[in-house]
Amino acid sequence: MKKFDPIAYKKMVKSYQDEDKPTDWFDSIYTDAEGDYREVFWADLEPNPYLLKWLKKCIFKHTGRKAIVIGCGVGDDAEALSEAGYEVTAFDISPEAIRLCKNRYSDTTVNYLIADLFDYPPQWAESFDLVYECNTIQVLPGKYRIQARDAMVSLLAPQGYILVSCRSRLKGEQEDDIPLPLDKEEIDGFIRCGLSEESFVAYDDTQEPPVPHFFASYKK
Ligand SMILES: C[S@@+](CC[C@H](N)C(=O)[O-])C[C@H]1O[C@@H](n2cnc3c(N)ncnc32)[C@H](O)[C@@H]1O
């Protein structure tokens, strides 16, 4: 098992970003876990509490609707959506992440797949009632963040919802951070794409020191 070194990690990610290969390193994080999903350093190993709150508060029925999870990691949020009643597709660009999900949830009804948000199967376009992403846009640099947002919007069925969960920052600050949190203007890009903001929460998480976050929902 490779011990997580935050400085080496940031250096490694930056080197891939500088070579304009911003997604080529993700699989290495999962292979470093050597088959143990609990060793993936960014995995909380529980569903996002803000996702659970949203599911509880939402007035429409989840049962039978179609959800897609972008960059599903080790699967906690995909499983929570499935438990809420969605028919869930969960994908990740990392083959090892998907292998970990399939081993972890051998009886799951979630359809775990290897896929790239930037080149997803064409039949997925406009076919999901819920598009969910947690912490994926923030690990992408520059133009790829906008491409990710646009790809997410393109997956939405009519009347569908997008949920975005991410670290946040004030505009102009932390510009060199990895991951690079989203600022308000950036997340408002979903509104500029023609969606309406249904809910927006800015909060600090429970880490020491606390890390500011956004959790937002948008409707088509
Ligand atoms: C920071 S991790 C977050 C994982 C998970 N959502 C979570 O909250 O624990 C970002 C995830 O997005 C995946 N990813 C990055 N770019 C992607 C792309 N273009 N298509 C699909 N998955 C991608 C990575 O492999 C990684 O699993």
Image: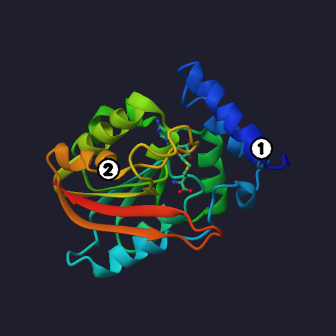
SS of the residue under disc 2:
helix
Q: 92 or 179: nearer the eye?
A: 179
Q: How many marks?
A: 2
User: In the rendered image, is residue 109 in sight?
Assistant: no
Q: Which mark is residue 187?
A: 2
Element type at marker 1? loop
Between 207 and 102, the one nearer to me in the picture: 207
Residue under the point 66% across and 52% down: 100
- The image position of residue 83, as x and y in percent, is 43, 74
* Number of other residues with Cα within 10 Å of mark 2, as a class: few under 14, some 14 to 19, many 20 or more: many
Neighbourhood count class around disc 1 (C-alpha, 10 Å): few under 14, some 14–19, many 20 upward: some
The residue nearer to you, when weighing 2 against 10, is 10
The amino acid pointed to by label 1 is: Asp
> Furthest-top residue in view?
19
Looking at marks 2 and 1 on the same chain, the residue that comes earlier in the sequence is marked by 1
- Above-or-below relation of 206 to 67: below
Circles 2, 1 touching at the beta carbon (< 8 Å): no
Residue type (three-letter) at the residue carrying disc 2: Ile
The residue lying at 32 percent from left, 41 percent from top is 149
Displayed quadrant of residue 26: top right
Instruction: Decide: is 95 above or below 18.
Output: below
User: What's the residue at 70%, 55% (across, down)?
Assistant: 41
Judge left or right: residue 148 versus residue 14. left
Q: Which residue is mark 1?
A: 32
| Residue at the spot 66% in from the left edge and 70% down from the top edge | 208
Q: Is residue 180 visible?
A: yes
